[in-house]
Amino acid sequence: MYGPLNITPDVLAEEATRLQRKLTAGVRTLHEMDEVDFGVTPREEVWRDGKVVLYRFKGERRPTAQVPILISYALVNRPYMVDLQEDKSLVRGLLERGEDVYVIDWGYPDRSDRYLTLEDYIERFIGGAVDHLRKAHGLPSINLLGICQGGAFSLCYAALHPDNIRNLITMVTPVDFHTPDNMLSNWNREIDVDLLVDTLGNVPADMMNFTYLMLKPWRLFAQKYVGMADILDDRKAMEDFLRMEKWIFDSPDQAGEAFREFSKQFFQQNRFMGETPPRIGSKDVHLGEIDMPVLNIYAEQDHLVPPDASRALRDLVGSDDYTELAFKGGHIGIYVSSRAQREVPQTIHDWLRKRS
């Protein structure tokens, strides 16, 4: 008897032989692969402010939507997650349905950006992009799609300038930063942010990446790479795997002052939920000023933005047209899973069409 797992010498020998074949095939696969790229949809630069660039995506047909969508992504990762590859692209799904899609690329901050503030990111950069699109399209207001931290930025902008936003969409966006299951926020509350920023200036990307990986160390450090052995002989699967790895580790440094302000006001003080509102420059942000239609999309298995952190928005906005979509997946799956490709772009398109 060898116990309930029935691990015999023959089973071990067979498994070792299988792994050897996989590794041999994997060496050949990796040798034949070119460097993986990302971003399948053509795009053109239409506006710039320093390192921050506004791109317009160009689909295979002209957009039929009269009001453009501006995507505001988080600062911690690159925004090409919304257009990662041909079969995993939120942007492509929206374009195929006739939407006119733009994205803000925040660029890579360096030492010259050390003193950029939240006011710069929200009023100067998002505001500048919104004003450009309003002028270019001859419209008083546009649609804004904020993702993760970019969603928090979008909430602030929409509250400060409600007349400029026709419809607001938030995806995996934190609102209540102090839910009990928000491990990232619990960690952040223990950090001396002033000491960190005063010492380092900009916050290094590698430090941020390590923090996120440590939220699920077994899954993101060990299990993922052990599982890679099963796809070593599958070129397409390896390309997908390496493309995702490239995105994960292609992270910009964080501009020091903006990091300080965001950490203090949101992670530590939870100002969306408290009596003291967030302050952007000289202005207070009151989410009750958001009176346009709101679509809030959250992921049910999100370990970075737990569902309750996002659902808190429903009780704070001033709009009487508020809709939620619960997506069965995680923080990354909401962009790249096959379910997401079917559900998310169609939901956004149908919701906007009813409000056109």
Image (spheres, helix red, strand yellow):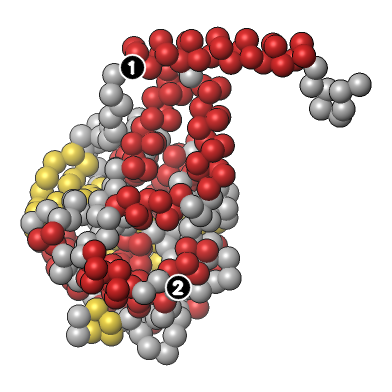
Instruction: Name the amino acid, label 1.
Output: Met
User: Does 206 sit left or right of 347 as displayed?
Assistant: left
Is residue 6 shown left or right of residue 23?
Answer: right
Residue 84 location (% of width, % of height): 34, 37
Label 1 neighbour load within 10 Å: few <14, some 14-19, many 20+: few
Point out residue 298 in the picture as x, y percentages from the top left corner.
50, 58
Query: Residue 275 in the image: x percent, y percent?
Result: 42, 90
> What's the CA distance linking mark 1 and mark 2?
44 Å
Question: Number of numbered discs present?
Answer: 2
Q: Nearer the viewer, residue 270 or 162?
A: 270
Asked whether, in this view, residue 267 is left or right of residue 282, the answer is: right
Contact? badges 1 and 2 (CB < 8 Å): no
Q: Secondary structure at mark 1?
A: loop
Residue at x-position 56% and y-position 12%: 20
Q: Is residue 89 above or below residue 306?
A: above
Q: Nearer the viewer, residue 293 or 41?
A: 41
Which image quadrant is residue 356 in?
A: bottom left
Is residue 189 depicted above or below 8 in this figure? below
Residue at position x 14%, y 51% in the image = 53
Name which residue lies at 58% across and 15% down.
19
Helix, strand or loop at disc 2?
loop
Which labelled disc corresponds to residue 170? none
Q: Nearer the viewer, residue 48 or 232?
A: 232
Q: Amino acid at mark 2?
A: Glu
**114 relative to 109, above or below:** below
Query: Mark 2 = which residue?
Result: 190
Compared across the picture, whether 204 is left or right of 173 comes to: left
Give the residue at mark 1. Answer: 33
- Residue that appears at 38% across and 88% down: 276
* Residue 28 is at least partly visible in this image: yes
